[in-house]
Image (tube, rainbow, N blue to C red):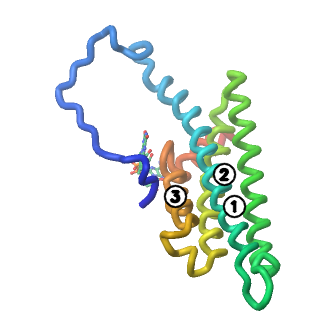
């Protein structure tokens, strides 16, 4: 569907023996390592999502300023302007959450909750902003010659990889003690 610059394929390891001196970390500690990797990975997906959303927003904004209908740029039409304002609001919110998560990660703090929150928020923002960008371009938004449809397709994986949005909500509920 998207992310065509990142090929995804099946990898199968049959009867694969790994020498003991190639062990990563401590034996029996795999789950803890995986959790730490996921915490960091979720911040990376949040950052990717903010970038995708920003790209989609910029493409939509410059198009809206250029495209004229009824003798004025469509950016001057309330419905289009409001869409762009909403996109900007969501991106800024997601960026702040992502920066907070990254700063806490760099400080060595426990980031399970904030990483999940940033990932959930930014991935949904990327998909919503991507969709809105397609809409702002109208018919051109649907064509492969224009960038928004690619941002929209790429953004969808952000709600799936490193734990789906459903799993983020599960983690967040658990973090709230629910
Ligand atoms: C292009 C691409 C690249 C990827 N890259 C990576 C990578 O680099 N590293 C990596 O580790 N993985 C990668 N993945 C895999 C990705 O992380 C998984 O697809 C994702 O975590 C979902 O797992 P699943 O596909 O097994 O779905 P499933 O677990 O089968 O889930 C299917 C549906 O059921 C829901 N569901 C499942 N369990 C629950 C539950 N307990 N509560 C509520 N809802 C639930 C899910 O939210 C989802 O909607 C990649 C996938 C794709 C498509």
Which numbered mark, 2 or 3, is in the foreground of this view?
Answer: 3
Report the Cα–Cα distance between label 2 and label 3: 13 Å
Can residue 172 be seen at all in this image of the molecule?
no
Which image quadrant for residue 104? Answer: top right
- The answer to whether residue 161 is above or below residue 80 is above
Decide which of 105, 59 is in the foreground and name it. Answer: 59
Q: How many marks?
A: 3
Report the Cα–Cα distance between label 1 and label 2: 20 Å
Please say if the residues under marks 3 and 1 sit with CB atoms less than 8 Å apart. no
**Helix, strand or loop at mark 3:** helix
Please say if the residues under marks 1 and 2 sit with CB atoms less than 8 Å apart. no
Which numbered mark, 1 or 2, is in the foreground of this view?
Answer: 1
Coordinates of residue 47 in the picture (x, y in percent)? 63, 43
Q: Seen from this angle, which residue lies furthest bottom?
A: 70
Q: Which quadrant is home to the C terminus?
A: top right
Which mark is on residue 58?
1
Q: Residues within 10 Å of mark 3 (few under 14, many from 20)?
A: many
Report the residue marked by disc 2. 121
User: Is the residue indicated by label 2 positioned so its CB lies within 8 Å of ligand 1?
Assistant: no
- The answer to whether residue 64 is above or below residue 47 is below
Decide which of 132, 59 is in the foreground and name it. Answer: 59
Name which of mark 1 and mark 2 comes first in the sequence.
Answer: 1
Decide which of 60, 145 is in the foreground and name it. Answer: 145
Identify the residue at image location x=57%, y=74%.
141
Identify the residue at image location x=46%, y=26%.
31
């Amino acid at each position: 569907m998207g992310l065509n610059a990142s090929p995804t394929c099946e990898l199968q390891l049959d009867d694969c023996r790994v020498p003991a001196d190639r062990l990563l970390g401590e034996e029996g500690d795999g789950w803890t390592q995986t959790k730490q990797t996921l915490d960091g990975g979720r911040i990376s997906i949040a950052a990717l999502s903010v970038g995708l959303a920003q790209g989609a927003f910029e493409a939509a904004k410059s198009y809206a300023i250029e495209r004229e209908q009824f003798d004025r740029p469509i950016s001057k039409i309330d419905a289009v302007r409001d869409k762009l304002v909403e996109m900007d609001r969501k991106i800024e919110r997601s960026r702040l959450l992502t920066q907070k998560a990254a700063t806490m990660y760099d400080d060595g703090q426990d980031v399970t909750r904030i990483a999940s929150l940033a990932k959930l928020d930014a991935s949904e923002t990327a998909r919503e902003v991507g969709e809105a960008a397609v809409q702002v371009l109208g018919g051109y938004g649907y064509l492969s010659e224009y960038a928004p449809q690619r941002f929209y397709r790429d953004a969808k994986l952000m709600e799936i990889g490193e734990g789906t949005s459903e799993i983020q909500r599960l983690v967040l509920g658990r973090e709230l003690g629910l």
